[in-house]
Image (cartoon, grey):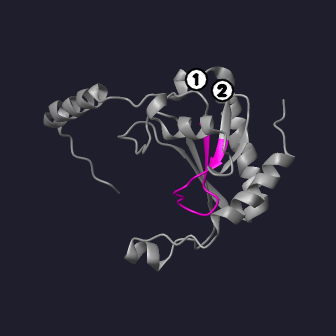
Amino acid sequence: MMKRIYAPWRNAYVTKAADSAKSEKRADATDCVFCKQIAENNDEKYFILNRYTHCFVMMNFYPYNAGHLLILPYEHKANLHELSLEARGEIMEVINTALCISEKALYNEGFNIGINLGSAGGGGIPSHLHVHTVPRWRGDTAFLEVLGETKLISNDLEKIYQDLKKAFDALTLAS
């Protein structure tokens, strides 16, 4: 069981770090890699699998595992509460669709799903909200990751893109 230490003297440090983070320049849409990729309209180049009314789904260029997808709103927003109810709802439907498609196409046994909000939350691109869906298989972490700090992805991203693209093109969201 994890032990906890009450340390109120650290409050000044934590508050100072939070104030510093608030003052950091927040990348706008003109600086955002996702906004640039969606505007370029080159879906195959950027592994964009499908476009919906409020969001789109794409493969991650730097996947944690084969078939790692990102679901993003078109709007350049950092937080869920900044999106309309319709956009949030559609994102959830697209997540569900992505899970079904991934499971059928990749035969994975589970998923990790997550949103990293803000730099402190682990967001590599914190100014544009995105949801990760990461397919998982039993035993997909082995000695190479643990000892070598290297993740082996034994699938061709181009082939995965083609397989998933066919499945996404064949489906539409339920209304």
Q: Nearer the viewer, residue 91 or 112?
A: 91
Q: Amino acid at mark 2?
A: Ala
Residue at image coords 70%, 31%? 90
Q: Can you give x and y, in whole percent of width and height, for residue 168 in the image?
A: 79, 48
Q: Can you give x and y, in whole percent of width and height, for residue 16 in the image?
A: 19, 30
Q: Label 2's element?
A: helix
User: Which quarter of the figure is the N terminus placed in?
Assistant: bottom left
Q: Can you give x and y, in whole percent of width and height, for residue 23 in the image?
A: 27, 25
Please identify the quarter of the rendering in which residue 22 is found. Answer: top left
Q: Is residue 75 above or below residue 103?
A: above
Left or right placement of residue 112 versus residue 23 in this view = right
Residue at image coords 37%, 29%? 26
Q: Can you give x and y, in whole percent of width and height, for residue 79 in the image?
A: 49, 29
Left or right placement of residue 52 versus residue 137 in this view = right
Label 1: which residue?
83
Mark 2 packing: few (<14 Cα in 10 Å), some, or many (20+)? Answer: many
Q: Is residue 42 above or below residue 65?
A: above
Q: Is residue 64 magenta?
A: yes
- Tell me if label 2 and label 1 are in contact, CB under 8 Å: yes
Mark 1 packing: few (<14 Cα in 10 Å), some, or many (20+)? Answer: some
Label 2: which residue?
87
Left or right placement of residue 113 versus residue 161 in this view = left
Q: Amino acid at mark 1?
A: Leu
